[in-house]
Amino acid sequence: MFAYHVDNQIDLALPRPEIDSPALFSLIVASRKKLVAWLPWVLKIKSAEDELTFLKSVCQHYGEGKSLNTVIYYENQPAGMISFNKFKKTDQSADIGYWLGNKFTKKGIMQRSVKAMCQLGFNDYQLNKIVINAAVENQPSNHVAQSCSFHFDGVLRANEYLIDGHFHDENHWSLLKSEWEQRK
């Protein structure tokens, strides 16, 4: 099983579908109102069985080399997920997606998890660029990108269709391997 130790509180690991789906589903239910504004897929997860199906699919995608979805464990309990949603081989890039359950926010968990994913992406996956796209209005997600030293590249107009039935502009953030290496 793939696992990555971030620090004394956080580990990232491939999902264990049968074990992790109930806990992750409970987090989604408890955080649904906040998550659904930015993550339309939340409405599709109506049961632990839906989450189980999703986790099995991301494990399959990992095996095929398409993506890397990990569960964020905070103090040994599932707190959310972070992923390279898709590896683009043509330009050696990947985009990061993430979410946390409400009770795990404001602890620096996501910033530390994003930095760990950058470490993995640049060192283990030989990426040249990592991207974060976040709706302009999604202040917490934009704060994560900014606090992790991602470069603000600009706004992608009407780039994301959200649950409110409207297209939203997205901030496009990127971090290059050369920038990551200079920070060390």
Image (cartoon, rainbow, N blue to C red):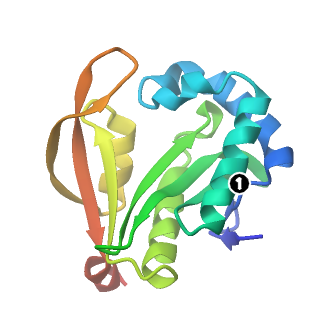
Residue 24, visible in the rendered structure:
no
Measured as percent of width and height from the top left, residue 159 is found at 23, 36
**Could you say which is closer to the camera, residue 176 or residue 60?**
60
* Kind of element beneath mark 1: strand
Tell me if residue 162 comes above or below residue 69 in the rendering: above
Residue at image point 46% right, 31% down: 39
Measured as percent of width and height from the top left, residue 56 is found at 73, 49
Residue at image point 32% right, 77% down: 128
For this orientation, the residue located farthest to the top is 164
Tell me if residue 184 comes above or below residue 156 in the rendering: below
Left-right relation of 80 to 95: right
> Residue tagged by mark 1?
73
For this orientation, the residue located farthest to the front is 64
Q: Locate residue 26: give its quadrant.
A: top right
Measured as percent of width and height from the top left, residue 106 is found at 52, 41
**Could you say which is closer to the camera, residue 44 or residue 25?**
44
Residue at image point 60% right, 59% down: 61
Quarter occupied by the N terminus: bottom right
Measured as percent of width and height from the top left, residue 163 is found at 40, 19
Q: Locate residue 42: give its quadrant.
A: top right
**Could you say which is closer to the camera, residue 42 or residue 6?**
42
Quarter occupied by the C terminus: bottom left
Residue 49, visible in the rendered structure:
yes
Tell me if residue 136 comes above or below residue 34 in the rendering: below
Left-right relation of 117 to 69: left
The three-letter amino acid code for the residue at tag 1 is Tyr
Tell me if residue 74 comes above or below residue 167 in the rendering: below
Q: Locate residue 23: give its quadrant.
A: top right
Residue at image point 24% right, 39% down: 170
Query: How crowded is the residue under tag 1: few (<14 C-alpha within 10 Å), some, or many (20+)?
Result: many
